[in-house]
Amino acid sequence: MANLVGRVTSGYIAAFARVPNLTIAVTIASGILILGMIGLKSLASVIALGVIFQECTS
């Protein structure tokens, strides 16, 4: 279900912002999430960040 939401919303956003701009935004967001993994201290935070990362890259 989350994959469907990500694909549909990215299609609508790409129609307005154009594909290169959307690609740049998603790349920056993914990089920030990866850097956020440095401060993880518990399993719950790893799972939460993993879910957010999956949503970002879908």
Image (cartoon, rainbow, N blue to C red):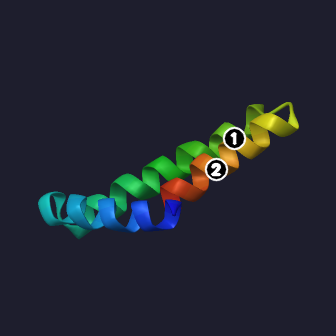
CB atoms of marks 2 and 1 within 8 Å: yes
x, y (%) of residue 31? 55, 50
Q: Which residue is mark 1?
A: 48
- Label 1 residue SS: helix
Q: Residue at x 41, y 60 (%)?
A: 5
For the question of whether residue 31 can be seen, the reply is yes
Image quadrant assignment for residue 43 = top right
x, y (%) of residue 13? 23, 58
Q: Residue at x 85, y 30 (%)?
A: 41
x, y (%) of residue 15? 15, 66
Q: Residue furthest left?
A: 16
**Residue type marked 1:** Ala
Q: Mark number for residue 26?
A: none
Q: Which residue is mark 2?
A: 51
Residue 45, compared with residue 21, is above or below; it is: above
Most foreground residue, 16 or 31 = 16
Most foreground residue, 43 or 34 = 43
